[in-house]
Amino acid sequence: MKIICVGKIKEKFFVGAIEEYSKRISKYTKLEIIQISDEANESVALKKEGEKILSKIKDNDYVVTLEIEGNSLTSLEFAKKIDNNFGSNKSLTFVIGSSYGLDDLVKQRSDYKLSFSKFTFPHQLFRIILLEQIYRAYKINNNENYHK
């Protein structure tokens, strides 16, 4: 499993949470987090960030982009999708864009558009939310207790 995300994590408390959930997930699957540098110039940011993201996606990756316009799932539905690898036998790759969003070419490459909420979250915080839901999915799929 791979997570491609834009921007650097600056706050130590975010870094600590990401490390903790990554460690927990490693019990179930190999996890690779690929951090793409964000662009300061808004007029070219989406295109340049999109090119960087696409360069990290392989042909055999099943790509799940995190988009406000995407499909909403419950934690149980998400767990089922993780369990069956979103219906594919490809390598599962999640993509989190920058504060500018995702380039249209990245959205077109997406195999599944997923929304966690109609809210907009800071992308640093959203990494933790995604990791927590992935961890929760593995706990559910392995019939292990996890707080509600």
Image (cartoon, rainbow, N blue to C red):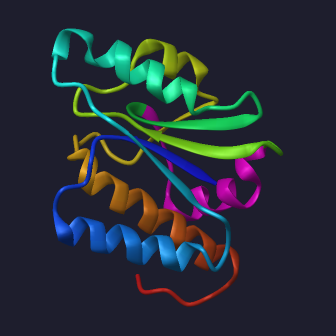
Rendered residue at 27%/18% (across/down): 45
Rendered residue at 48%/70% (across/down): 22
Rendered residue at 77%/55% (across/down): 84
List x then y, in percent, for residue 91.
Answer: 73, 45
In the picture, the quarter occupied by the N terminus is bottom right
**Residue closest to the far bottom:** 145
Task: Establish if 109 lies above or below 138.
Answer: above
Q: Would residue 112 appear left or right of 39 to someone viewing this image?
A: right
Task: Establish if 73 lies above or below 14.
Answer: above
| Magenta stretch: helix, strand or loop mostly | helix
Q: Nearer the viewer, residue 21 or 74?
A: 21
In the picture, the quarter occupied by the C terminus is bottom left
**Residue closest to the far top:** 43
The region drawn magenta spans 70-87
**Residue closest to the far right:** 89
Q: Would residue 5 appear left or right of 32 to someone viewing this image?
A: left
Q: Nearer the viewer, residue 39 or 143?
A: 39
Whether the magenta-drawn stretch holds residue 25 is answered as no
Query: Which of the 4 quarters of the picture holds residue 49?
Result: top left
Q: Would residue 91 appear left or right of 69 to someone viewing this image?
A: right
Rendered residue at 36%/13% (across/down): 47
List x then y, in percent, for residue 136.
Answer: 52, 72
